[in-house]
Image (spheres, rainbow, N blue to C red):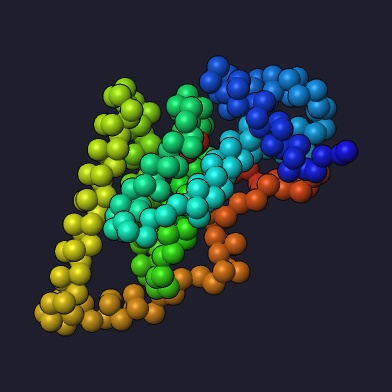
Amino acid sequence: MMMTGSETADRLLDAIVTHVPFDGWSDAALRAGLADTGLGAADLAAAFPRGAVDAAILYHRRGDAALQGRLAQADMGALRIRDRVARAVRTRIEIAADREVVRRGVALFALPHLAPEGARLTWSTADTIWTALGDPSDDLNWYTKRVILSGVYSSTVLFWLGDKSPGDEATWAFLDRRIDDVMQFERIKAAANRNPLFKTLFAGPLWLAGQVRAPSDAARDTLPGRWTPPASGAPGPATGPASEPGA
């Protein structure tokens, strides 16, 4: 039976990832993975038009998809929202598992021309988490929640890459501290919003912020955080100024 384009990409990626710790997300890793599968160069070009960049993106997207599936099955109804977020971030990092593969991805998307691509991946992970947790916001908070969580996730991944503590205990403690910092900020913001003087002084900016609405479901597909692999034989996204990841 002939494989679909996505099945071919998944098969290639499984083989490529085993070489990434040694060769990075590079043409060398792609060639070695291709040799392991027995597929042809045309299959590799169709699956990953931009080569290692598209392979690394698919690796990250696959992790997000796995996270979405786990969160859909998790029973977190009794947990506070900060604990739900912490568990989601921890689960996403545990899905990545291989530090060296992630480290190589971070290095790839730290390149100046790929940094915006990496930022889109981080945003997409934050969006996956908030959407899976049932985030009800439809205003400016829709954006600020994802911006803040992107920072928490990125910094936690970087800490995890250097963590040598048993069971990554230091990483999870770091994650808890970061989320506590965010929650403290939210408490301060809520108190300010209840202050009559604050409302008077910032009536204009507050009104303007209140006009912002989260994008519709259809419009979300056009946001920078959304990416789907190109159809077999179709050209990939244009290379250019386009950071994390790899996780």
Residue lying at 73% horizontally and 20% vertically, measured from the top left: 36
- Residue 14 in the image: above or below residue 36: below
Residue 223 is situated, as x and y percent measured from the top left of the image, at 54, 60
Instruction: Report how many numbered discs are placed on residues in the image.
Output: 0
Which image quadrant for residue 29? Answer: top right
Residue 92 is situated, as x and y percent measured from the top left of the image, at 45, 42
Residue lying at 54% horizontally and 50% vertically, measured from the top left: 69
Residue lying at 60% horizontally and 69% vertically, measured from the top left: 218
**Nearest to the observer: residue 23 or residue 204:** 23
Specify whether residue 47 is in view.
no
Farthest residue in the right direction? Answer: 1
**Nearest to the observer: residue 114 or residue 53:** 53
Which image quadrant for residue 160? Answer: top left
Residue lying at 28% horizontally and 76% vertically, measured from the top left: 205
Position of 116 with respect to 210 (left or right) is right
Position of 89 with respect to 17 (left or right) is left
Tell me the quarter of the image containing the N terminus.
top right
- Residue 236 in the image: above or below residue 100: below
